[in-house]
Image (cartoon, rainbow, N blue to C red):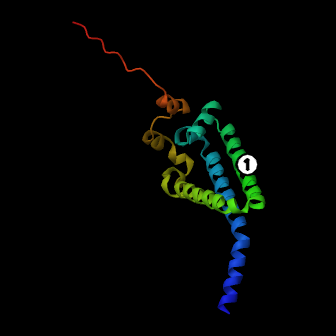
Amino acid sequence: MLRQWSKCACTLVQRVWFPVLWSFIAAVSAFDTFLTIRFEDLMSVVERNAVGRFLIDLDNGGIGLFVRTKIAGTVIVLIALVALHLYQRRWARPVTIALAAFQFGLLSYLALSEPALQKPATEVSAELAASLPAPRTVWDDIAWFLPHEEPHHSHTR
């Protein structure tokens, strides 16, 4: 009896693991996008991803380009996962599990470590803006890697 139940449970897990993890990845991405839209006024200050900051800067502080890019990226990833599941089963499981683990980390970060997300947007304004570092652009990050000259100190007598 136990052996039969175990075999049935394994078959069930083999059949549902992909749709469950795929749905989880999509849901976390949708939640992240919802928060981006919900806190639109703060995104130029709170966005930590350099590419996200670049897209917001490119859109003159708006989030339209950023949100469209997030959605397009999510759709591409979800389609790629389905293709992997259909045509490269050996790769589908580790890739899907890795992405689901990353999304779990993102969900944990969004839900637990961002105090701004636990208050209404109207309460977050000046207090949050004062506590965060000055907004940076992707060019600030790139400039760090570029060779630059040390300032010349003049020695006068």
Q: Which of 73/65 is in front?
A: 73
Q: Is residue 88 left or right of residue 127?
A: right
Q: Residues within 10 Å of mark 1 (few under 14, many from 20)?
A: few
**Extreme-top residue of the structure:** 157
Q: Which of 65/24 is in front?
A: 24
Q: Is residue 123 left or right of residue 32?
A: left
For the C terminus, the image quarter is top left
User: Which residue is found at the position 56% from the left and 48% from the top?
Assistant: 121
User: Which residue is found at the position 44% from the left and 38% from the top?
Assistant: 133
Residue 80 in percent (x, y) is at 73, 53
Q: Which of 118/80 is in front?
A: 80
For the N terminus, the image quarter is bottom right
- Which amino acid type is shown beneath numbered disc 1? Ile
Residue 116 in percent (x, y) is at 51, 50
**Image quadrant of residue 18?**
bottom right
Q: Which residue is mark 1?
A: 76
12 lies above or below 150: below
Residue 104 in percent (x, y) is at 58, 59
Question: The residue tagged with tag 1: helix, strand or loop?
Answer: helix
User: Which residue is found at the position 64% from the left and 57% from the top?
Assistant: 28
